[in-house]
């Protein structure tokens, strides 16, 4: 469990550094959640295409790529107005 949190934190942080534009959602906990979601996405896709064996998880690089995908999807949902922007308080 601790390994997943550390991978999630690092992957979320790297995704924030690599992603252009606004980096919403912000915050330490949401960065970890972003990275963990990216790690789960990368693990699911990797197992589906046969890159990872059942029970094997994604590493730092693929978790970061997954977190970038999750951040991109989040930004598209905010741009379309489906999800409200937590950084834009009116």
Image (spheres, rainbow, N blue to C red):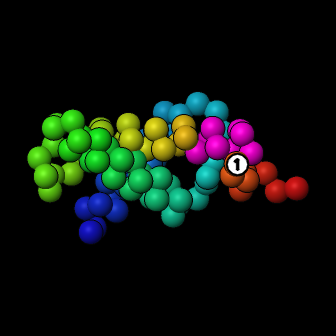
Q: Nearer the viewer, residue 71 or 73?
A: 73
- Determine if residue 59 is in view: no
Q: Residues within 10 Å of mark 1 (few under 14, many from 20)?
A: few
**Range of magenta residues:** 74-81
Residue holding disc 1: 82
Q: Residue furthest left?
A: 53
- Quadrant of the image occupied by residue 14: top left
The residue furthest bottom is 1
Residue occupying image coordinates x 29% and y 41% = 45
From the viewer's perspective, tell me whether residue 63 is left or right of residue 71: left
Majority secondary structure of magenta residues:
helix
**Considering the numbered disc 1 on the image, is that residue within a helix, a strand or a loop?**
loop
Q: Quadrant of the N terminus?
A: bottom left
Image quadrant where residue 61 sits: top left
Identify which residue, 85 or 13, lies in the foreground: 85
Figure disc tally: 1
Say which residue appears at 58% left-offset and 59% top-offset: 27
In the figure, 63 relative to 34: above or below? above
């Amino acid at each position: 469990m601790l390994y997943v949190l550390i991978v999630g934190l690092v992957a979320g942080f790297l995704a924030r550094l690599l992603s252009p534009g606004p980096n919403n959602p912000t915050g330490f906990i949401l960065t970890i959640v972003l990275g963990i979601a990216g790690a789960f996405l990368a693990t699911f896709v990797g197992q589906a295409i046969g890159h990872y064996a059942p029970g094997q998880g994604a590493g730092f690089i693929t978790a970061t790529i997954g977190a970038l995908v999750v951040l991109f999807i989040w930004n598209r949902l905010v741009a379309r107005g489906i999800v409200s922007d937590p950084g834009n308080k009116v």
